[in-house]
């Protein structure tokens, strides 16, 4: 049912027109060195993309058409997408969790179960994912009735997780942490600036809470069951009293825990997730999943600088994070 604050109201929200994405000449866009030795990052509409990501963005603008009941899972890279995909799939398919042939989480990488909307793949589920900033989402999503769930994470942990993840493909040629740190602070990273990415979805959730839900990775770690129940309710498939009494919420949480998923053979595999031209082994998506791992890598000065930037960027927004 449409409400007066629906995202369909283009007067209340920034909507990107498809023709803005046609005939883009990469050579005309500002470029900067990427975090690994491949293609440069290109600045487009205030955000940095490598050419493959930018092409995916253009393709989704031109071709992606959601169904009204679709749910779009969004985040800045390395902020909990693997976990969010797993939880939302398990919530939606919770009657099949004990069926080893029907429960795809037992045999497939979560990123193959819930595809990215920028990739031309068939999807039988009403679940899609994207790292695209809010103001660059396809018009078809902005104007539809589908819901958006965004997960964000302490920027210090995002930086470390992203640097390690990129190192799985860049190896010794990945830029040093000190250089990655400076680029992250400056907003020069894929889909960055991180700060603008988070704020875009946060502000949308304040305007349109019935359409956009924002959750924090750290909160999900602290009280997973409670947040899973809230997410299920937002998705339109809340747990019944009987399901809660039977422990179904806890079973969903246990199945999707880092320990459970990382120990599955499919997720320990050296097989590559090959939807993107860049190849990532399945196991690269399951490094630690911890809160506060940044303490093992960042100096006190680096941590203080990121806290200062976050305080400046998020100040007055209502956003806060565990430092």
Image: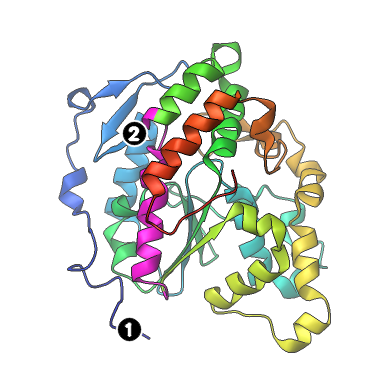
Which part of the image, by quadrant, shows the N terminus?
bottom left
SS of the residue under disc 1: loop
Q: Which residue is mark 1?
A: 3
Left or right: residue 141 compared with residue 78: left
Magenta residue span = 186-210
SS of the residue under disc 2: strand
Q: Quadrant of residue 184?
A: top left
Residue 170 versus residue 217 in the image, above or below:
above
Percent across and percent down for residue 188 are 38, 29
> Which class describes the residues within 10 Å of circle 2: few (<14), some (14-19), or many (20+)?
many
Q: Nearer the viewer, residue 31 or 299?
A: 299
Left or right: residue 221 compared with residue 307: right
Say if mark 1 contacts mark 2, CB within 8 Å: no
**Residue 1 in view of the camera:** yes
Residue 18 versus residue 272 in the image, above or below:
below
Q: Of the residues under marks 1 and 2, which one precedes in the sequence?
A: 1
């Amino acid at each position: 049912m449409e409400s007066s604050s629906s995202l369909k109201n283009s007067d209340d929200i920034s909507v990107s027109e498809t023709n803005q994405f046609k005939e883009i000449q990469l050579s005309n866009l500002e470029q900067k060195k990427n975090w690994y030795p491949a293609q440069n990052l290109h600045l487009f509409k205030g955000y940095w993309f490598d050419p493959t990501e930018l092409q995916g963005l253009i393709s989704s603008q031109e071709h992606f058409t959601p169904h009204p009941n679709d749910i779009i899972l969004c985040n800045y890279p390395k902020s909990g997408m693997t976990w969010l995909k797993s939880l939302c799939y398990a919530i939606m398919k919770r009657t099949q969790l004990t069926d080893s042939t029907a429960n795809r989480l037992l045999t497939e990488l979560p990123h193959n179960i819930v595809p990215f909307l920028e990739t031309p793949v068939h999807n039988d589920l009403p679940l899609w994912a994207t790292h695209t900033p809010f103001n660059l989402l396809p018009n078809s999503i902005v104007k539809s009735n589908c819901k958006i769930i965004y997960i964000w994470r302490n920027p210090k942990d995002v930086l470390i997780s992203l640097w390690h993840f990129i190192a799985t493909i860049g190896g010794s040629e990945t830029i040093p942490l000190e250089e990655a740190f400076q680029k992250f602070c400056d907003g020069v990273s894929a889909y960055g600036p991180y700060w603008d990415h988070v704020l875009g979805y946060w502000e949308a959730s304040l305007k349109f809470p019935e359409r956009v839900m924002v959750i924090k990775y750290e909160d999900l770690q602290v009280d997973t069951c409670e947040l899973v129940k809230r997410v299920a309710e937002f998705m339109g498939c809340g747990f019944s009293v009987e399901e809660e009494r039977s422990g179904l919420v806890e079973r969903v949480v246990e199945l999707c825990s880092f320990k459970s998923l990382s120990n599955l053979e499919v997720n320990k595999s050296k097989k590559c997730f090959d939807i993107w031209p860049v190849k990532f082994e399945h196991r690269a998506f399951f490094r630690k999943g911890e809160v506060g791992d940044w303490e093992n890598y960042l100096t006190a000065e680096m941590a203080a600088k990121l806290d200062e930037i976050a305080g400046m960027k998020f100040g007055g927004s209502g956003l806060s994070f565990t430092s």
